Amino acid sequence: MRESKNQDYPPVQEMTDDQRIEIVKDIFASVTDKYDFLNKFLSGRRDVAWRERTVKEMNFFNTYRFLDVATGTGDLALDCTRKYPNVYVTGVDFVQEMVDRGNEKITVQNLSDKVELKWGDATNLEFEDNTFDVTAMAFGIRNIPDKEKALKEMKRIIVPDGQVMVLELTTPEPGFWRSIYSFYLKGLLPKLARIFTTNPSAYKYLADSIINFPTRREFVALMESVGLKNCRAIPLTFGVCTLYIGKKKHE
């Protein structure tokens, strides 16, 4: 694991694209050893239910292959292979420390013949067109400056009528829950993270990246703009998380 720099990061809106990419690498490399625990602790274990809902919505009908983009430590990839044992799963992530941790989990669970995790860039996927039935990204796209390029790559590598799925932390609609969630993100989350990680600034960035993520309507419009059809947004847990689904058109 890389040594944490334990520094304050600039606001998301002030970062250059290159700066943001390096900051994200630094953040996830610095929290790898506690990443799974913090995901469950800071979400009240709702992350488990959100991934289960994502896997439930998947449809395998042609290649029976799934690509998990920005796989992290492989939780979504592993959830998929448990639900669909006849599907071969590949996961890619550009933080090698996360990939290594995920491969450790795969080995422990004796799933190396069904799941493969490796280094990969979401904006330049090293797979041929029409390779997978489904591709998904869980809690990763808000960290990618060029979201449009990532979505285009995800669309490219799936078969016609295949699914592009994005599971992402979002903000509830204006009102009571948004106020509560905003207080949690800005006030409580960094303080809780400080107890468990040497890089609490990572969770200040997390809150900032969620607050500055596009609205549901804006993100659905982005999915449609890259050529996906039947795009929809499914709010989860009062809208603090959203599952986006679109299908590849026949071209």
Image (tube, grey):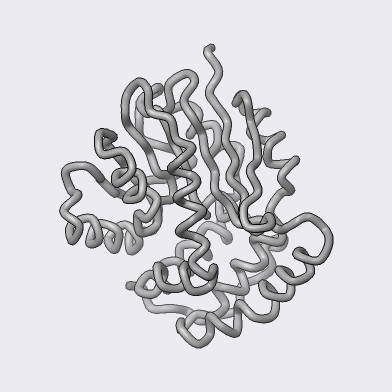
Q: Position of residue 101 (x, y in %)?
A: 29, 63
228 or 108, which lies in front? 108
Given the current orientation, which residue lies at the most extreme top position? 251
Quadrant including the N terminus: bottom left
Q: Residue 223 occupies which quadrant of the picture?
A: top right
Give percent across and percent down for residue 172.
Answer: 73, 57
| Residue 208 on image: x %, y % | 67, 66
Residue at x 53%, y 23% (from the top left corner)? 248
Residue drawn at point x = 35 percent, y = 26 percent: 131
96, above or below 38, in the image: above
Hey, which residue is sitting farthest bottom in the picture? 195
Q: Nearer the viewer, residue 116 or 45?
A: 45
Question: At 27% across and 60% down in the image, what residue appears?
Answer: 100
From the viewer's perspective, tell me whether residue 118 is left or right of residue 161. Answer: left
Horizontal side of residue 130 vs 166, given as left or right: left
Looking at the image, residue 35 sits to the left or right of residue 63; the answer is right
Residue 56 location, x and y as percent? Answer: 45, 41
Relative to 49, residue 234 above or below: above
